[in-house]
Amino acid sequence: MMMNLSTLKSLNVRLFVVMFYMFDVTAKSQTNYSKFAIPAVIAFGDSILDTGNNDYIETIMKADFRPYGRDFFGGKPTGRFSNGRIPSDFLAEKFGIKDTLPPYLDPTLEIEDLLTGVSFASAGSGYDPLTPELAAVLSVEDQLNMFKDYIGKLKADAGKERTAFILAESVFFISMGSNDVSVTYFMSPYRRNEYNVEDYTSMLVNICSNFLQELYKYGARKIGVLSLSPIGCVPLQRTLGGGGERNCVESLNQAAMVFNSKLSSSIEALNKSLPKARLVYLDNYSELNEIIQHYNKFGFEVGDTACCGVGNIEAGILCNSFSLKVCENATKYVFWDSIHPTERTYSMLVTSTIAKNVHKFV
């Protein structure tokens, strides 16, 4: 029986409480890349890159309460879905810009903050317009509109010439698609009644391609696009669909790989059609999967459950300091909550990603 959209929204807002998705890769080098003279890091996407924009909009998709941020500077929650910093912050740090990347919607930002980069990402978002609608968060279009507003502020303060330089020489990062595939498609009947996996992933990649072209039109040239991770291996999905052994959910992982293959081909085609573009496909799948499957090799003690709560389903408002036990040392865990990695995991992943791909941006 087909649900109406109103009923579907109500269902999925609850589903989204525990369904934000992740960034993934691995770590080896501690190189600082400030020598490349990148003026700013600018981020778009979902909870992997959202440093707190959702704190300033009407949504339940927030992480502005303890124990989130427990290991952040000052030990305070900031809207980041982790115990500490997230990839947006580490990316800015690796390029020698600043220790944290602020959310664009923070009303206390100064022009100096804008000149060195911000995050437009919104936890729970995705390429599919239905995904942010169901979660009541910022869509791709909303994030693009904020970016246009940002450009206007740069021009007003720094002038057109310097603004053009900042946009052309900065590195942009995008992380979206996990919420689309794992929630809007697999946990909701709405899209599955319209598309099979092949068609749905093609739709997502087409939207991504259009978004990249829009960014290019407004001056962005160096853009890294994160692939999907093995989303079927996060603790939540293991609990919901992994059986008694809590195995990885292969249907989700297969869909992620289908998406990734199409995304890689799309980026390759855009590099040929956009003459000054430095678009980089960042393959996250294999590296995070390596950490998850062989966590002991990377110095972790737990790879299939999370630090917060029982570690199987808790994320968002279900991960809290009042009713759940939280592990004492998050560095022993690959995952902070049932979806998102710990600060240590994120640091390792970003370090590896930049080490392998920095040359492609210059």
Image: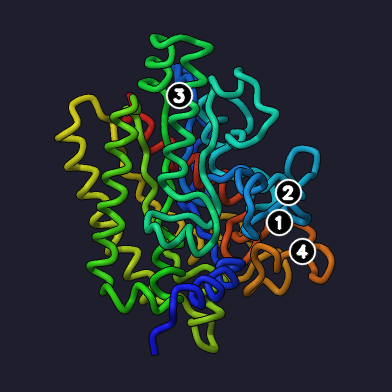
| Label 2 residue SS | loop
Residue 94 in sight in this render: yes
Image location (x, y in percent) of residue 173:
43, 38
At label 1, the amino acid type is Ala
Q: Would you say the residues marked 2 and 3 are in contact, meaning their CB atoms lie under 8 Å apart?
A: no
Q: Would you say the residues marked 2 and 1 are in contact, meaning their CB atoms lie under 8 Å apart?
A: no
Residue closer to the observer: 1 or 226: 1
Q: In which quadrant will I find the N terminus?
A: bottom left
Residue closer to the observer: 84 or 19: 19
At label 4, the amino acid type is Asn
Mark on residue 320? 4
Between discs 4 and 2, the one toward the N terminus? 2
Q: In which quadrant will I find the C terminus?
A: top left
- How far is mark 4 from mark 2, CA to CA? 11 Å
Residue 136 is left or right of residue 337, and the answer is left
Image location (x, y in percent) of residue 140:
42, 47
Q: Would you say the residues marked 4 and 1 are in contact, meaning their CB atoms lie under 8 Å apart?
A: no
- How far is mark 3 from mark 4, CA to CA? 37 Å
At label 3, the amino acid type is Ile
Between discs 4 and 1, the one toward the N terminus? 4
Judging by the rendered image, the residue that carries numbered circle 2 is 69
At label 2, the amino acid type is Gly
Q: Find the residue positioned furthest to the right.
A: 322
* Comparing labels 4 and 1, the label whose residue is closer to the camera: 4
Mark on residue 330? 1
Q: Is residue 154 above or below residue 101?
A: above
Judging by the rendered image, the residue that carries numbered circle 3 is 151
Between discs 2 and 3, the one toward the N terminus? 2
Residue 181 is left or right of residue 99, and the answer is left
| Label 4 residue SS | loop
Between discs 3 and 1, the one toward the N terminus? 3
| Label 1 residue SS | helix
